[in-house]
Each structure stands twice: as structure tokens, then as C-alpha cells.
Image (spheres, helix red, strand yellow):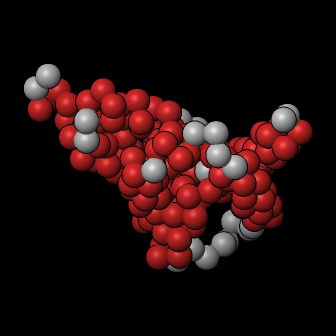
Amino acid sequence: MSDVILALIGVLLGISIAAPPGPVTAILVRKASLSATAGIFVGLGAMSADFILMVLTFSIKALLIGSLIIPAIYAAGSLFFGILAYQAAFSGDQEKVFAGKSYPTGLAMGLTNPFQIGWWITAGLAFNQKFGLFPFYFLFIGIFIWVLFISYAVRLSVLRYGRTMKRILRIFSSLTLGTFSALFLYYFIGYVLVP
């Protein structure tokens, strides 16, 4: 397979991680509604988490399968996303955003997001086995393209439609984060109760 095709596969893989609605997208949308730069920094934090997860997954892949790490990740994810859902629901429209503070939020979300971790343990490992490391150099280009697109699209829609769009995005963010918090709690309970 040519390097160009492998690079394209990598870009598409990056978009496949970043594009689906989930907790990272919810907080990125919330921050981008106030500042496109803050949304980008959330995305960069989550992208950094992907890099860390990639290195860890490819380094210790044999130890991850069937370990007790997974239920602990679900518990941490449930708590973290529950807190973020509460903050998204009750923060006002005049909330101040400092773009640099959005990066640690994105990083922490990425490192505690069971779906992101699950992607690396499943799809990431499978693509690595099939195509090697080369496509993963381009995966981060795909993530970055998506982060830029969604951050500016959200910010421009808020500038055009004002407070109504901010309220819609706040409701979307809080409901999405709350749903994922509950889902991760359910998964954690399932791991604990099922022998």
C-alpha cells in the first residue's frame, strides 16, 4: 500500500476519533461558544491525551486486556464528566474563558474518557497491527483539522445567532456530559457486579 494511501488512512482515523459526539466534543462546543481559541485548546488537550494513550497502548498492549484498569477508568470518567455536566448546566452566559485553561481540561477529559481509551485498545491496536505506525503520524493531522473546523463553526454560529445559540449549546453540553457520566457509572457497576 502506498504512503499516500496510508497517510489518508491516518487522517481519516484522526477524524474518526474526534468527530463522533461525546464528552470531549460537548466541552469543546461549550468552550468554543465563548471563544474559538478556547475550543481549539480543549481539542489540543484531548489530542495530547490521544498521543499519550497511543504510546501507552502500543507499549503495554498485552497488559491492558482484561485488567482492572478499565473499571477504574469508568469510575473516574463518570465522576469527572458529572462535575463538568454540572458546571456546563449552571454556568452563566457571561462566563469568562481563558483559552490556556482549556488545554488541561481537554487533556484530563481525554485521559479519563473510557471511549477514547477504548478506541485505542480496539481500533488503534487493530490498525497498528494491520498498517504499522506510519498512518498514526497523520492521525493527529485529522484530529487537528476537525478541532479547527468545529471550534470555528460553533463560534461563528454563536456570533450570528447570539444568546439563543449559547443556551442551546449549554443545554447540549450539559445533557451530553450528564449522559456520559451516567453511562460510565453504569459500565463501572457492570464491571464490579459481573464476576
Q: Position of residue 139 (x, y in %)?
A: 31, 43
- Of residues 88 and 3, the one nearer the viewer is 3
Q: Residue furthest right?
A: 193
- Of residues 139 and 177, the one nearer the viewer is 139
Q: Residue at x 25, y 41 (%)?
A: 133
Q: Residue at x 64, y 39 (%)?
A: 66
Q: Position of residue 44 (x, y in %)?
A: 41, 60
- Of residues 38 and 62, the one nearer the viewer is 62
Q: Position of residue 173 (x, y in %)?
A: 68, 50
Apparent side of residue 128 relative to residue 166 in the rendered image (left or right) = left
Quadrant for the N terminus, please. top left
Q: 178 above or below 4?
A: below
Q: Residue furthest top?
A: 1
Q: Residue at x 42, y 37 (%)?
A: 124
**From where the camera sits, is residue 51 visible?**
yes
- Of residues 117 and 146, the one nearer the viewer is 117
Exactly how many numbered labels are in the figure?
Answer: 0
**From where the camera sits, is residue 158 visible?**
no
Q: Quadrant of residue 72?
A: bottom right
Apparent side of residue 31 relative to residue 54 in the rendered image (left or right) = right
Quadrant for the C terminus, please. top right
Apparent side of residue 159 relative to residue 71 in the rendered image (left or right) = left
Q: Residue at x 78, y 59 (%)?
A: 79
Q: Position of residue 115 (x, y in %)?
A: 60, 41
